[in-house]
Image (tube, helix red, strand yellow):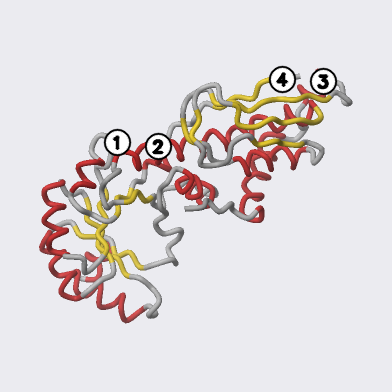
Amino acid sequence: MTLAPLPRLMIEPAVRAALLEDLGLAGDITSAAVIPAEHRSSLVVAARQPGVIAGLDAAELAFQLVDPAISILRHLPDGAAVASGDVIATITGPSRALLTGERTALNFLGHLSGIATVTAQLVDAIKGTRASIACTRKTTPGLRALEKYAVRAGGGMNHRFALSDAVLIKDNHVAIAGGVMEAVRRAKAGVGHMVKIELEVDTLEQLREAMEIGVDAVLLDNMTPEKLREAVAIVDRRAVTEASGRVTLETVAAIAAAGVDLISVGWCTHSAPTLDIGLDYLS
């Protein structure tokens, strides 16, 4: 699947805010004091550990918002696997501006590449099964579009982008509505025919109720692989099956082997370690 880039309009507010935060009230006083105004440099962006790249557009924009005279030659695209030492891009321009934009650019590139990397590891762990890896809404405030893009760069899928995308009836909805049947009935009466309805279930009894009234998808929450197999058999392809909870790199293969369609993972966005990427002086 081709990885479509995000429009600049979606990326720029986050990058601009990050730059303003870093520049403070006086700008980059170190570079202004140490580097002559007319000096130019070439730098290389290089991986310092293996992983998958994501966030090059955000990194490039960070430099160009500081100074449009900066040019970037990409050697690898987002979604590419890298080994330690691989050169990702070469950047040329006014030295002061390069150093001013460095940290913001690397923050975005390292964070998003970290998300792409762990997503790729999860995807690789379930190869040969019918399941796909999906992210959740457990994202950094203000960075959801970028983080969900990074999941796609790692070979994963996106769950809901926002509360308005689809109906997801969770345990508290069920409790307040008075039960599964009533919650689903209200949802069907309250949304249009184009809106999908997913129900979170904790037990096989709730799942049987869901199949009786009918939903588009079921979120099978915190079930063991054995119980997931039972749940998949009950659903019998009448709805999309999604496993959630207790998903790690060590458990994901067994979860996928139970026959679910999706495995949703929150930590791939909220707790992915940053990929170590450096900016090194070339000339």
* Nearer to us: label 2 or label 3: 2
Query: Residue 110's image quarter?
Result: top right
Confirm or deny contact between disc 2 and disc 3 (CB under 8 A): no
Query: Residue 103's image quarter?
Result: top right
SS class of the residue under badge 2?
Answer: helix
Local packing at callout 3 (Cα closer than 10 Å; few below 14, some 14-19, many 20+) is some
Instruction: Answer whether residue 250 is visible to the viewer in this image.
Output: yes
Q: Which residue is mark 1?
A: 249
In the rendered image, residue 221, in percent from the top left (x then y), is placed at 22, 53
Compare residues 173 and 213 and report the one nearer the observer: 213
Q: Which residue is mark 3?
A: 35
Confirm or deny contact between disc 2 and disc 4 (CB under 8 A): no
Confirm or deny contact between disc 1 and disc 4 (CB under 8 A): no
Q: Is residue 189 above or below residue 251?
A: below
Distance from Cα at disc 3 to Cα at disc 1: 46 Å
Q: Is residue 165 above or below residue 73?
A: below
Mark on residue 282?
Answer: 4
Local packing at callout 1 (Cα closer than 10 Å; few below 14, some 14-19, many 20+) is some
- Residue type beneath disc 1: Leu
Residue at left 39%, top 73%?
195
Local packing at callout 2 (Cα closer than 10 Å; few below 14, some 14-19, many 20+) is many
Compare residues 101 and 230 and report the one nearer the observer: 230
Which mark sits nearer the N-terminus, 3 or 4? Answer: 3
Residue at left 60%, top 24%?
278
Confirm or deny contact between disc 1 and disc 2 (CB under 8 A): yes
Distance from Cα at disc 2 to Cα at disc 3: 38 Å
Distance from Cα at disc 3 to Cα at disc 4: 16 Å
Compare residues 38 and 75 and report the one nearer the observer: 75
Which mark sits nearer the N-terminus, 1 or 2? Answer: 2
